[in-house]
Amino acid sequence: MLIFFAVSLNFISTPGIQVQLPKSAAQEVAREAKDLRVAIAASGRTYLNEQEVDQSALEGRFKTAAAVSRQTQVLIQADEQVAHGKVVEVMDLARAAGLFRLAIVTQPKDRAQR
């Protein structure tokens, strides 16, 4: 079973990685220490927990995390300029590794915009 949701998180910080998150009225969720944070910059560069990775390394880290706990959550922070296909690619890698708790990180919308 796949668990997927959009989540607004104010507290995720990726120093040195510029990601302009899309805005959403989604609910906030609690973050756990074992969560994996994947940031995709507008340039297309991918980062796992603030370290740049290629697709092969990302796949390996997902498999390692799934071996430890299939309950590991993958938080995807994609710049709003990133192609949808790149986000889906990361989601597919996570699912193929056995990780099904996926979340798209957004920034909260202003109440006036709702």
Image (tube, helix red, strand yellow):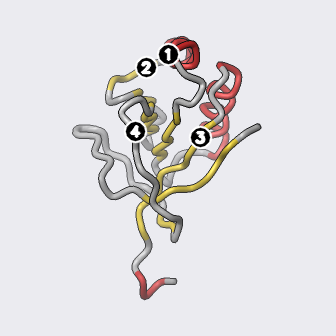
Point out the frontmost of discs 1 and 4.
4
Taking the spot 59% from the left edge, 40% from the top edge, the residue there is: 102
User: In what element is the residue under mark 2?
Assistant: strand
Q: Earlier in the sequence, mark 4 or mark 2?
A: 4
Amino acid type at circle 2 is Val
Query: In which image quadrant can residue 36 be found?
Result: top left
Residue position marked by numbered label 2 in the rendering: 53
Taking the spot 45% from the left edge, 60% from the top edge, the residue there is: 28
Q: Earlier in the sequence, mark 1 or mark 4?
A: 4
Amino acid type at circle 1 is Arg
Point out the frontmost of discs 4 and 2.
4
Taking the spot 39% from the left edge, 54% from the top edge, the residue there is: 20
Residue position marked by numbered label 3 in the rendering: 102
What is the distance, in whole Å, between disc 1 and disc 3 at their CAs? Answer: 15 Å
Query: In which image quadrant can residue 33 be found?
Result: top left
Residue 61 is marked as 1
Residue 46 x/y as whole percent? 45, 30
* Mark 3 Cα-neighbour bin, 10 Å: few <14, some 14–19, many ≥20: many
Residue position marked by numbered label 4 in the rendering: 32
* Mark 1 Cα-neighbour bin, 10 Å: few <14, some 14–19, many ≥20: some
What is the distance, in whole Å, between disc 2 and disc 3 at their CAs? Answer: 19 Å
